[in-house]
Image (cartoon, rainbow, N blue to C red):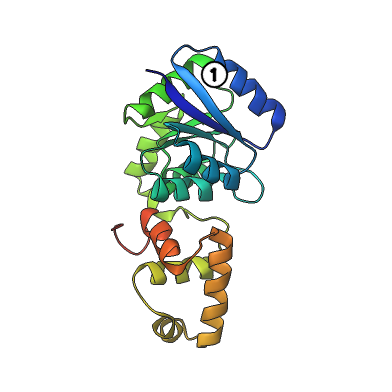
Amino acid sequence: MSVSVLVADDHPMFRAGMVTVLQDLDDIEVVGQAANGREAVELVARMAPDVVLMDLRMPEVGGLEATARIKVEHPDTAVIVLTMDSDDDSIFAALRAGARGYLLKESDGLDIERAINGVARGEAVFGAGIAERVLTLFSQGRSSAVSPFPELTPRELEMLELIAGGLDNPTIARRLFLSEKTVRNRVSAILTKLHARSRAEMVALARDAGLGGPAS
């Protein structure tokens, strides 16, 4: 049985080339393409692919946000980040958002095929040179220092941590020495940046990324 794949990348030529590579593989079926993270989330809801190949840097909704939403809303779909970004912060932000694999765009077709089949079986798959760095950085405790939501300011991330911990706006206002109006405005800004439809969805995204305690 073939593995169904959605390709999400904002560069049309790269996306078309990747689709061509995947279509030549007998055990993989491309079921859709997305030009940004918003489209990726919408198509996953409609098509329920086994795997998403996700670029990190896309307009409207980035790959990190889309990955976090897919993990919360469609946990049976595995996400492999396929990007040019090889820095440690990008790797750990992707993992904390819920990615099951991380490959660089320089990977060849065979590596991508192996990764797709691997995550479809429930494995975690990393490209050449990535796995060793993940192990090393985890052993150094670096993962806790990486923000899963780089689009948020440090103050917004601090507030999201408190929200995910179950605190209401008045309590957050007292904790951070802010007015309740300021807290409400910043909560609205966080909702917009995370493209969350409600406070509950925002909490789910935050907890799934490791903020505020374990996800429920």
Query: Residue under circle 1?
Result: 22
Whether residue 109 is situated above or below residue 182 in the rendered picture: above
What x and y, as percent, mark residue 120?
37, 28
User: At 53% across and 66% down in the image, what residue appears?
Assistant: 191
Q: Is residue 118 left or right of residue 129?
A: left
Q: Quadrant of the C terminus?
A: bottom left
Q: Which quadrant is home to the N terminus?
A: top left
On screen, 159 above or below 109?
A: below
Q: Position of residue 13 (x, y in %)?
A: 71, 26
From the top left corner, tell me how far across and down residue 116 is, in percent: 43, 25
Q: 13 or 139, which is in the foreground? A: 13
Q: Is residue 122 left or right of residue 44?
A: left
> Measured along the vertical axis of the image, is residue 83 above or below residue 94?
above
Residue at 38% across, 67% down? 164
Relative placement, left or right, of 139 versus 102 is: left
| Residue 34 % position (x, y) | 61, 37
Q: Residues within 10 Å of mark 1 (few under 14, many from 20)?
A: many
Numbered disc total: 1
Residue extending furthest toward the front: 46
Residue at 55% over, 59% down: 195
Amino acid type, residue under disc 1 in the picture:
Leu
Q: Circle 1 — which element?
A: helix
Seen from the viewer's position, the closer of residues 162 and 25 is 25
Judging depth in this view, the residue of 196 and 182 nearest the camera is: 196
Q: Quadrant of residue 214?
A: bottom left
Residue 157 seen in the current view:
yes
Residue 142, can we see it?
no
